[in-house]
Amino acid sequence: SQHAFMGVGPLLAKFIFGIRYLIYERGSIYSLVLSWPSKYLTLLSLKNADAAVSLTQDMKLAMQKLYNREVIVIPNGVDFEKHVGLTKASARNELDIPYGKRVLLYVGRLHPIKGLSYLIKAMHILVKGIVDDPILIMVGDGPDRKILEQLTSNLGLNQNVKFIGQVANEKVPAYMAAADVFVLPSLSEGLPGVILEAMA
C-alpha cells in the first residue's frame, strides 16, 4: 500500500545521513492491516522512528500491535472562535437556504471511501415520506461528483440534493450552523476534523 512506502524515504535518510524522523498515523486503523512486504516496511519505519504519534487511541493500539513502542496520541482540534455568533436563521439567510426546510449536510471530498452513494440512496427513502421535504447539501468536490450527480438524477432527487462544490474554509461554519443534521457516511475514517467542526 502507499501507506507503507511513505516511510521508506525517512528510513533511508536516517540510515544514510543520520536524519531523525517522526511517524504520524492519522488514517484508519485498517491502513495498518497490511500484507508483506508492506507490513515489513511499515514495521521497519515504525521501529526506527525517533517518535511515533497517532490521531486516536485505537490507532495507537494498532501501531503498538505492529511494533510495541511508545506512541503519543494527539487528537485533532477545532477552533471554536469560527463558530461563535452563528445562528441557524442568520446562516440560512447568508446562504439562501429556506428556513422551513429540513436540512442535512455533508462536507468533504466526493470520494468512494466517503460512502456518499449510500447517503443519496437514503435520501430517496426520506423523500418518499419519512421526512417532509428534506434537502441534502453536499459541500465539497472530488472524483465521484459526476457519478453522484447522475445517481441523484436517476433517483429523481435534483430538488432535494444540492451539490455546492468547493467553498472557502471560512464559509464552512455557516453551512454547519444552517443544517439540522450533519452526516458523514464514510466507510473508513480516523478522527475527521469535520466531525469536530459539526459538534462545535
Image (cartoon, rainbow, N blue to C red):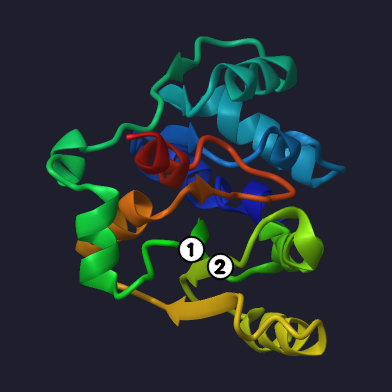
At which x and y percent is residue 108? 49, 61
At which x and y percent is residue 21? 38, 35
Which is nearer the N-term, disc 1 or disc 2? 1
- Residue at 81 percent across and 62 percent down: it is 125
Q: Is residue 174 visible?
A: yes
Q: Is residue 112 above or below residue 47?
A: below
Q: Within 10 Å of the Cα at label 2, are there few (<14), some (14-19), or many (20+) other Cα atoms? A: many
At which x and y percent is residue 91? 25, 59
Element marked by disc 2 = strand
**Front: mark 1 or 2:** 1
Q: Is residue 9 above or below residue 157?
A: above
Q: Is residue 81 above or below residue 72?
A: below
- Residue at 65 percent across and 15 percent down: it is 61
> 56 or 125, which lies in front?
125
Q: Label 2, on which residue?
A: 135
Q: Which mark is residue 101?
A: 1
- Residue at 73 percent across and 16 percent down: it is 65
